[in-house]
């Protein structure tokens, strides 16, 4: 039971922790670069929202796991798959929104201040971040709660599950912390590029998972397996788990999943590049950062 | 603001936790494999033991096995003996080696062994779930210390990092507490290699600053004194001139104004220099603010009269308005505020001086009916040589030092200066609030410096 608990808790915590680290790194980048420029402090992104979103996420995860029976009976007993697919699609959508809203066009600073739109934009950006983190915790938290609910009562394995859960959570949280320090330790322009890349891969991951869930619910047709890289990197290994959480690695994806992944990555990539990539790198060059 | 300590502690603990837990995971997996081999070897031993049993009707009682183990002995396709929990069918193919089987509602690890001497097949079975639980319980004992150790390690890392950063903390508090006029070097004997460069640079800056201050001090003092003498001479010459030329001629009046402005400027420069925190040597004594205000008002009365301005004093009658301060400095503060009020208030305008006392502070306000000061200039006016746009309209432009001196003196007395709109249709209101209870000259100094 120990190893099962490690795998399940690690998988869920890792996904949520990496998402949170990524967004916090974005936030840090945003605040540091805007502090360099003349944007008033009131327009900086606050870190307080992370607390709200974590609390909201836990509450929703609890509600979700309590009402699991009702949810799974919906839509001809595929309600759970459909609901999870909806959560994943929403996450993907808001990740694209973050990429779209993230920039503050530095060379338009004065115009932006005059028109007053950055505060609205920052409000929307904060809201998107809150929703993404909340959904991640809802997704992963409800699965941990289901697992814990199934185990409680089995006195024999209680301790090994507890140890397993702690080890899984420890690995997941420390990976998240180290990813955050890694991302924020990079030079600003590289930090931004890496964060955006990871954001794009996460969005692809969300889209692919949504497709997989809808296929399981028979709402989408089965398509052939695109490849099998199980021998190269086992999904169940720690490295496999990490790759799954970080870039959505799956050893046997279907063609439809691959297509959804590519669409997710491109959506983030395009909204990010069109909005800010060249602008920011230009302003960074001007600034000599 | 990012904290070095939080970064160090979090990253070290995260790294330790990651490596420890991944190692625990690997350890768990390899220990479980080892335990499996151990259990298999035990089964082999048991098989050897069972092979050598004398098969007789009471064998099953002679060899009592726990409920987690079962055996069968077969010969020529017939079951010779078995444990009570073994099924009637054979447990394993007649092929030597290990396998799995399901019976009695459990999954069992099975072993088949053929004994050529007795031409018997011996089958041993062991419940996998119990084997697993037994092995896991042993292995988990080795993981427990790692789990319990992390909070302890976290605490220790926190303590060591805090200790490691202590010299930095000491240095920063030393710098914070250093009085502004203390140019002594920070001692380096207790320092660390990493701070050596910082310390030597700071000490270098401080000694250069001291030299610069000394030069400035000498220059201001020398310049002021050297300039005072020729101006006095000029004034005497001007006085003498009045006997030969018409003292009301515009050229004479302008010359007189010019010399007075120059004299004022030099006096202000001297005051500024004397009231700067680095130079100020307080001669603090309890002063009656009310009497002081009346004194200064009386002395400056001609200034107001010249422009036919009304000046009045409110409050200060009943309350005891004692502040601990330097008489000369406070007189300078008052006269600068009043001269300013007069200067920027048109003829026949109004100036009101008010004194008030609350539980913890004494406030002095000077309000005028002049043009007032735009809000964006409220901080700027305290800078040296600041001239505002509307200053050109004043009939006698100042030198831009008056309010800087007011700021200096206020800070030296732990007081605050606020600028707001006056009670009149237009005009400025300067409020100086002196705290009561902080009337200790050392604290004055500290406050002055920290601000």
Image (spheres, rainbow, N blue to C red):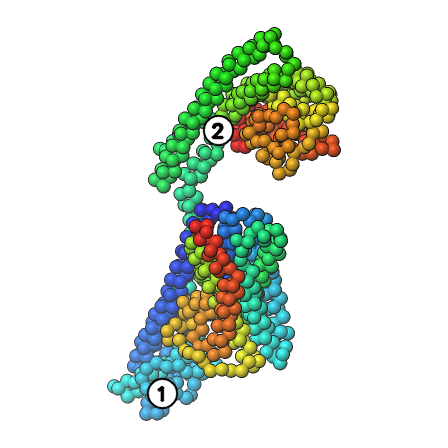
A46 shown above or below B222: below
Question: Residue at (56%, 70%) from the top-left corner?
Answer: A89
Circle 1 sits on which residue?
B93
Mark 2 lies on a secondary structure that is: loop
Label annotation for residue B180: 2
What is the crowding at mark 1: few (fewer than 14 residues within 10 Å), some, or many (at least 20)?
few
B161 shown above or below A7: above
Residue B250 in view of the camera:
yes
Question: Residue at (28%, 85%) from the top-left corner?
Answer: B115
B93 shown above or below A68: below
How many marks overall?
2
User: Percent x, y for residue A241?
Assistant: 44, 68
Mark closer to the chain start, 2 or 1? 1
Mark 1 lies on a secondary structure that is: loop
Label annotation for residue A16: none
User: Percent x, y for residue B275?
Assistant: 54, 23
Q: Could you say which is closer to the camera, residue B42 or residue B102?
A: B102
């Amino acid at each position: 039971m120990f190893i099962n608990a490690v795998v399940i808790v690690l998988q869920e915590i890792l996904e949520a922790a990496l998402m949170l680290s990524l967004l916090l790194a974005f936030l840090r980048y945003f605040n540091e670069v805007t502090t360099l420029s003349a944007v008033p402090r009131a327009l900086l992104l606050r870190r307080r929202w992370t607390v709200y979103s974590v609390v909201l996420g836990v509450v929703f995860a609890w509600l979700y796991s309590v009402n699991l029976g009702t949810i799974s009976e919906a839509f001809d007993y595929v309600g759970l798959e459909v609901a999870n697919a909806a959560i994943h699609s929403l996450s993907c959508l808001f990740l694209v929104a973050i990429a779209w809203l993230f920039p503050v066009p530095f060379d338009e600073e004065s115009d932006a201040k005059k028109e007053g739109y950055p505060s609205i934009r920052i409000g929307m950006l904060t809201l998107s971040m809150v929703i993404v983190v909340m959904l991640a915790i809802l997704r992963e938290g409800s699965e941990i709660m289901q697992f814990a609910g199934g185990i409680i009562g089995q006195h024999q394995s209680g301790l090994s599950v507890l140890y397993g859960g702690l080890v899984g959570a420890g690995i997941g949280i420390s990976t998240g912390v180290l990813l955050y320090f890694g991302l924020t330790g990079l030079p600003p322009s590289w930090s931004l590029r890496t964060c955006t890349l990871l954001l794009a891969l996460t969005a692809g991951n969300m889209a692919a998972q949504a497709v997989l869930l809808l296929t399981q619910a028979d709402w989408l047709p089965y398509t052939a397996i695109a490849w099998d890289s199980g021998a190269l990197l086992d999904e169940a290994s720690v490295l496999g788990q990490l790759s799954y959480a970080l870039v959505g690695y799956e050893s046997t994806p279907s063609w439809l999943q691959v297509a959804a992944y590519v669409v997710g990555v491109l959506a983030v990539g395009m909204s990010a590049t069109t909005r800010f990539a060249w602008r920011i790198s230009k302003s960074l060059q001007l600034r000599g950062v | 603001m990012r904290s070095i300590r939080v970064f160090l502690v979090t990253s070290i603990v995260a790294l330790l936790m990651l490596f420890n837990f991944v190692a625990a995971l690997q350890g768990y997996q390899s220990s479980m494999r080892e335990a499996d081999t151990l259990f298999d070897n035990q089964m082999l031993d048991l098989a050897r033991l069972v092979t050598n049993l004398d098969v007789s009707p009471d064998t099953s009682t002679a060899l009592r096995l726990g409920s987690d183990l079962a055996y069968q002995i077969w010969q020529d396709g017939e079951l010779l003996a078995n444990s009570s929990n073994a099924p009637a069918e054979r447990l394993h193919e007649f092929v030597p080696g290990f396998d799995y089987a399901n019976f009695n509602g459990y999954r069992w690890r099975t072993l088949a062994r053929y004994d050529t001497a007795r031409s018997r097949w011996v089958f041993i079975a062991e419940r996998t779930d119990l084997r697993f639980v037994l092995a896991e319980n042993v292995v988990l004992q080795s993981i427990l210390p790692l789990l319990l150790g992390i909070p302890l390690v976290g605490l220790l890392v926190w303590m060591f990092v805090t200790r490691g950063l202590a010299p930095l903390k000491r240095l920063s508090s030393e710098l914070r507490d250093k009085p502004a006029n203390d140019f002594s070097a920070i001692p380096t004997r207790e320092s660390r290699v990493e701070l050596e460069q910082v310390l030597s640079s700071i000490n270098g800056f401080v000694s250069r600053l001291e030299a610069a201050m000394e030069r400035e001090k000498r220059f201001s003092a020398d310049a002021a004194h050297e300039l005072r003498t020729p101006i006095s001479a000029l004034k005497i010459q001007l006085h003498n001139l009045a006997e030969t030329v018409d003292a009301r001629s515009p050229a004479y009046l302008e010359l007189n104004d010019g010399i007075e402005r120059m004299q004022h400027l030099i006096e202000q420069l001297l005051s500024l220099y004397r009231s700067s925190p680095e130079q100020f040597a307080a001669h603090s004594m309890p002063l009656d603010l009310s009497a002081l205000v009346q004194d200064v008002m009386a002395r400056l009365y001609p200034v107001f009269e010249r422009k036919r301005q009304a000046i009045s004093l409110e409050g200060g009658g009943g309350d005891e308005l004692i502040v601990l301060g330097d008489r000369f400095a406070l007189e300078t503060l008052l006269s600068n505020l009043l001269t300013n009020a007069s200067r920027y208030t048109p003829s026949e305008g109004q100036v009101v001086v008010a004194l008030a006392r609350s539980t913890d502070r004494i406030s002095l306000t000077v309000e005028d009916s002049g043009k007032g000061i735009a809000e964006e200039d409220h901080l700027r006016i305290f800078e040296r040589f600041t001239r505002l746009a509307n200053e050109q309209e004043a009939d006698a432009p100042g030198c831009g030092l008056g309010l800087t001196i007011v700021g200096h003196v206020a800070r030296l007395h732990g007081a605050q200066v606020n600028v707001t709109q006056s009670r009149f249709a237009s005009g400025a209101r300067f409020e100086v609030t002196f705290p009561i209870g902080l009337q200790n000259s050392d604290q004055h100094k500290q406050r002055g410096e920290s601000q």
